[in-house]
Image (spheres, rainbow, N blue to C red):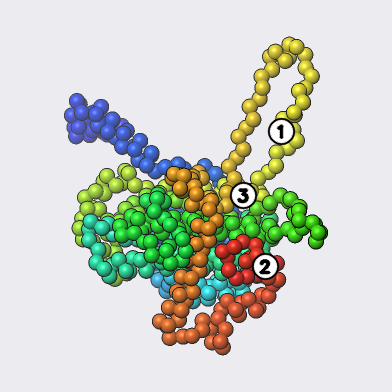
Amino acid sequence: MAIFIITEGITKLIPSGWLFPFAGIIIGLTLVRAWTAGRTNTRDRDLHGRMILVTGAFTATGLELMLELAKRGAQIVALVPDLSDQLVQILVQLIQQTTGNELVFAEKCDMTSPASIRQFHETFVKGRTGTGMQAEPPRIDAVIFCHEYAHIGVWDRLGRSKAQRLEEEDRRRKNAYGTYFFSTLFLPFLLRSPAERDIRFINLVNPMYAASVSQFEPKGVASVAASSPASVTELEGERSLRSILFARHFQRVLDALINPPVPPTSQDSTQVPITPKKQSNIKFVTACPGFGLEESIAPFLGATKDDAGVSQSRLGRFLYFILWPLLFFIAKQPAATSQTPLYTLCVPHNNKVPKPSAEAVPSAEPQASSSSAGASAKPKRSQEPDPVLTGGGLYRECDMVQLPSERGKWLMEEESVGRAVWEWLEAGVKAWEEEEKERLGTTDAKPGGKDASSTAAAETAQPEVDVDSTLPGLKGKFKAS
C-alpha cells in the first residue's frame, strides 16, 4: 500500500517523460557526493584504556572525532578555553549518553594562552585533573590537534579591513605557537613513558598547503616571518605547510633522541660502529581532512560569526546561502572530514605490527617435487604488507601522500628547512610569552620568581638528554629517563 501511494505521488509530481532523466540526476548527484566525501576509514582499533587529548574538540570535526573515539572506548579529555560554557557540559553529557562511555571529560586549556597551557601541563603531570586519572602515573596515548584545521580569513574579493587582516594573522600565529608549545612542553613527560607504548601526535591542517610550496623560502627566522604573501589562500597555505614541516622535523627530533651518536670503538680508531637506527615509539603526523563545509568553505566566504556574534561578511553569508545546495554535494561533512584523522589513529604502529612467521617467509631454495606436481604448481604471489604509520608523514584521504612537485619533496626531506621552521616557532613562542606577561602585568608565570616549567622540572628531576648534540636546530635540553 505504501509503495503504491509513493508511486502515485511521484507520477503526479513528475511527468512520465521526465522520470528517467530525474532518476539519472538523482543517481549522478549521489555519485558526486560519494566521490567528494573521499575515502572512508576501514580500520578499527580497540581504544579501551587509552587516554586521548583533543584540542578544538567542539569544532565540527572535533565533535565527530570525539564521538568515534568514545564508541571505541577511549578516555577522552577535551581541551577548551572556558569550562564555564554550558554548551561544553551539554555536549560532553550527550556524547557520554549516546556512546555509553562515561570517560569523556573537559579540561581547561586555552591553546592561545601560554599560561593556560603551562597550567594544564602542571595539573596533568601532577595527576590533579578531573578526568579520573588521579592515580599515578598519568598517561597520554594520543594528542589530536583540531584547533589548526579551521580556515582563517575571508576571501579577498569580499573585502577585508586592515584590522581584520591583523586579527587573522594574530590567530594564525597563536594557533601555530600553541601546537609547538604544547608538544614541546609535554615531550619530557612522554619520553619517560614505557618504550613499548604507542603514542601519537596528530595535527589537522587545512588543504591549502599546495598553494605555498612554490614560494616557501625558509632561510631563517626573519625571512619565514617576512615572506608572508598577500592573498588569504597563500597565507593559509603557508600556515598549513609550516605545520607539515614542523611535524616532519619534530619526528626527526624524536628519532634522534633514541639514536644518540655512537663514539668510536677506541681513541685511535676513526671508524664508528654501524648500528641499525631505531624508530621512536612517539609518532608525529599531519592529517589533512580536505575541504569541509563548516570549517573550510563557510569561513572562506565569511559566513561564520566572530566572538561578538556578528557575521564577518554579509555578502559572503548571502553567497553561502545561495550556493549551499551546490556546496552540500561538493564539500565534506564532519563525518567525512574525520575519516583521515581517524585512520592515522587506527593504522598500526611500527612496533605493533606482528612479524611474519617463519612459515610465511618464502624459501630461497627450490623444494624438490615430482614432475607432475611441478607442472601443475603455480608460484604464489607475495602479499603486500599492511600500511604502517610513518612518523612525520602527511596523510590525506586515508593514505600517506607527498607534497606536490620535486620542490615539495625537497622541503620535506631537507633538515635545514625544518630547523628554520622550528627556530621561527621557538622565537615566536618566547615573544608570545613575554607579550602575555606584559598584557597581564606580571613578570613570572608563578609567584616566587619561578615559572611553571622550572617548578615542574625541579619536582620531576630526571637525567638530561643533550638534544643539541643529537640534532642541530633543537636548542635546549629535554628531560628523559
The location of residue 441, given as percent across then percent down, is 43, 86
- Kindly report the distance in space between the C-alpha atoms of the residues bearing marks 2 and 1: 41 Å
Is 148 situated left or right of 400 in this image? left
Q: Are marks 1 and 3 in contact (CB under 8 Å)?
A: no
Front in this rendered view, residue 270 or 349: 270
Q: Quadrant of the C terminus?
A: bottom right
The residue at 51%/84% (across/down) is 444
Which of discs 2 and 1 lies nearer the camera? The answer is 2
Is 182 situated left or right of 112 in this image? right
Q: Are marks 2 and 1 in contact (CB under 8 Å)?
A: no
Q: Residue furthest top?
A: 372
Local packing at callout 2 (Cα closer than 10 Å; few below 14, some 14-19, many 20+) is some
Tag 1 residue: 360
Tag 3 residue: 349
Picture quadrant of residue 198 = bottom right
Front in this rendered view, residue 10 or 456: 456
The location of residue 169, given as percent across then percent down, is 35, 66
Amino acid bearing label 2: Val
On residue 465, the disc is: 2
Helix, strand or loop for disc 3: loop
- Kindly report the distance in space between the C-alpha atoms of the residues bearing marks 1 and 3: 21 Å
The residue at 66%/19% (across/down) is 378
Q: Note whether 85 is above or below 393 in the view shown.
A: below
Amino acid bearing label 3: His
Amino acid bearing label 1: Ala
Q: How many marks?
A: 3
Front in this rendered view, residue 50 or 147: 147
